Image (cartoon, rainbow, N blue to C red):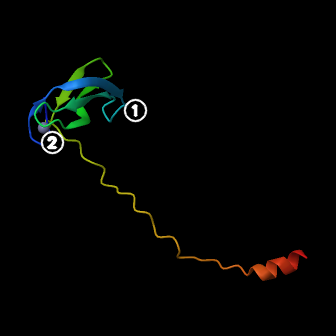
Amino acid sequence: MVKCPKCGTDVQPTKTWQLVSPLPDVDGRISITVMGSFRCPSCGYSWRGKVSVMKVGPNGEVEFQTGKARRRRRKKEERKEEPRGGTIIEIDLSEIEEDEL
Ligand SMILES: [Zn+2]
């Protein structure tokens, strides 16, 4: 069951669909994420979110993850873009034009 982020009411998904991750995880399992669209009957807020995650192993074993049972570690690597501008090559356009002539 998913709770409304606005008022905390338990909300059933009005529609669900599955997202299959094409790449297996470390254990060779493929995760199938069940997504749902929700509409809170209490406050009318609607949103989309994860309903549950199913993991299917290479031998057919299935593991369910629902709600907050297990949180995946977010990737720590935040891609920080290096500030570019360390090397600025200035080209004197007038010189080039002269060479081409
Ligand atoms: Zn609500």
Q: Is mark 2 within 8 Å of ligand 1?
A: yes
Q: Is residue 88 visible?
A: yes
| Position of 84 relative to 18 (above/below) | below
- Circle 1: residue type: Leu
Query: In front: 30, or 97?
Result: 97
- Circle 2: residue type: Pro
Q: Position of residue 26 (x, y in %)?
A: 32, 36
Q: Determine the secondary structure under disc 2.
A: loop
Q: Position of residue 14 (x, y in %)?
A: 23, 24
Q: Position of residue 16 (x, y in %)?
A: 27, 24
* Cα gap from disc 1 to disc 2, whole angstroms: 30 Å
Q: Which residue is mark 1?
A: 23
Q: For ligand 1, which image quadrant applies?
A: top left
Residue at 21 percent of width and 31 percent of height: 38
Say left or right for 56 vs 23: left
Earlier along the polypeptide chain: callout 1 or callout 2? 2
Query: In front: 19, or 58?
Result: 19
Q: Position of residue 70 (x, y in %)?
A: 16, 38
Q: Which residue is mark 2?
A: 5
Res. 49 image quadrant:
top left
Res. 98 image quadrant:
bottom right
Q: Which mark is residue 63?
A: none
Residue at 9 percent of width and 31 percent of height: 10
Query: In front: 33, or 64?
Result: 33
Residue at 59 percent of width and 77 percent of height: 88
Query: In front: 44, or 23?
Result: 44
Residue at 24 percent of width and 33 percent of height: 50
